[in-house]
Amino acid sequence: MTLQVLYRGPLESCNYGCAYCPFAKRIEDPAARARDEAALERFVDHVAADSRQRWAIFFTPWGEALVRTAYQRAIGRLTRMAHVERVALQTNLSVSARWLRRAEPAKVGLWCTFHPTETDRGSFVRRVLAHRAAGATVSVGVVGMPAHLAAARALREALPEDVYLWINAAKRTHGAYDEALRSAFRAIDPHFETNTFRHRSRGEACATGWDTISVDGRGDVRRCHFVPEVLGNLYDGTFAPARRPCPNETCGCHIGYVHLDRLGLRALYGSGLLERSLPTSRRLPVVGAPRARIASTCQS
Ligand code: SF4
Ligand code: SF4
């Protein structure tokens, strides 16, 4: 079994300042930065040492990690380990593709969010294309604020057809979508609907805690980012994978509900599961799921 780890260390800074950002936008002092880098290095060392396990790593920071050379080095190191299958990262893709020279690009998956108030479309698209040309797999996305509709349409036009452009519903800051806006975003992302509501999940089978876990900077393991119970620690061997039903009423974030069995999204995304990439042939809409309209805190 490949263990998929959603790693989120102490990092909580970003080089952008999006108004809708749900994360802490702070400037770290050198001590905080050193703590984050030490936690990252410990995690990478642990993965390096445990070659009996196959790994896939997904960095989901509370900020932007790719601007940090420590993360570029970490991805480089991880991708060169034979027992690591994939390393994915959520990023604003504000860096050039040169850092990929440190890595095995075929193992790199990038979840790239376009923030129209922070960068221009032309530069962003050039960076997307450069990362693809260097061998990484990419998905591109936009937060579905009404004000972003024109930017999302233009971005769809500017990207090659085989780059999936997802739209994340701004459930926390925008609330419910009227049919016109819903349909406009659906025309860009046929899977937009799936992200517009929180999925009923209590008692349902979800693969988190089994083959997918969340790990923080101390190595504490939770099943996912949305259930606070600590299941053990990765470094002291106290975590044991087990199949457990979801204890939460609902699950509203893509990086969580994608592991909910009944939605069948793992089969849909296949090898692009972590970075949310989707071949053109699989971009058929998912319909008929029940809705629970509860405010969400996730829109990155
Ligand atoms: S939404 Fe992402 S890119 Fe924008 S400020 Fe927050 S962490 Fe940075
Ligand atoms: S359904 Fe969502 S909240 Fe529930 S365990 Fe899975 S990822 Fe976590």
Image (spheres, helix red, strand yellow):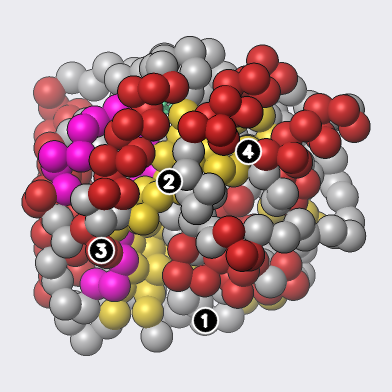
User: Which comes before the other along the chain, label 2 or label 1?
Assistant: 2
Q: From the image, tell me which residue sits under label 4.
A: 167
Callout 2 touching callout 3 (CB < 8 Å): no
Q: For residue 31, which quarter of the picture? A: top left
Q: Amino acid at mark 4?
A: Ile
Q: Are marks 4 and 3 in contact (CB under 8 Å)?
A: no
- Estimate the x, y position of residue 118 in percent, counting from the top left: 42, 15
Contact, CB < 8 Å: mark 4 with mark 1? no
Reading the image, the residue beneath label 3 is 106
Q: Is residue 149 left or right of residue 228?
A: right
Task: Identify the amino acid type marked 2.
Answer: Trp
Mark before the other along the chain sequence, 1 or 3: 3
Query: Which numbered disc, 2 or 1, marks the residue closer to the eye?
Result: 2
What residue did someone put label 2 on?
111
Q: CA distance from mark 4 to mark 2?
A: 12 Å
- Secondary structure of the residue carrying numbered label 3: helix
Q: Which residue lies at the image location 77% right of the left edge and 32% below the top edge?
A: 184
Relative to residue 265, is residue 32 depicted above or below?
above
Q: Which residue is mark 1?
A: 242
Which amino acid type is marked by label 3? Ala
Image coordinates for residue 198, horizontal then vertical, percent: 76, 47
Report the amino acid beneath label 1: Ala
Q: Which residues are magenta?
A: 84-100
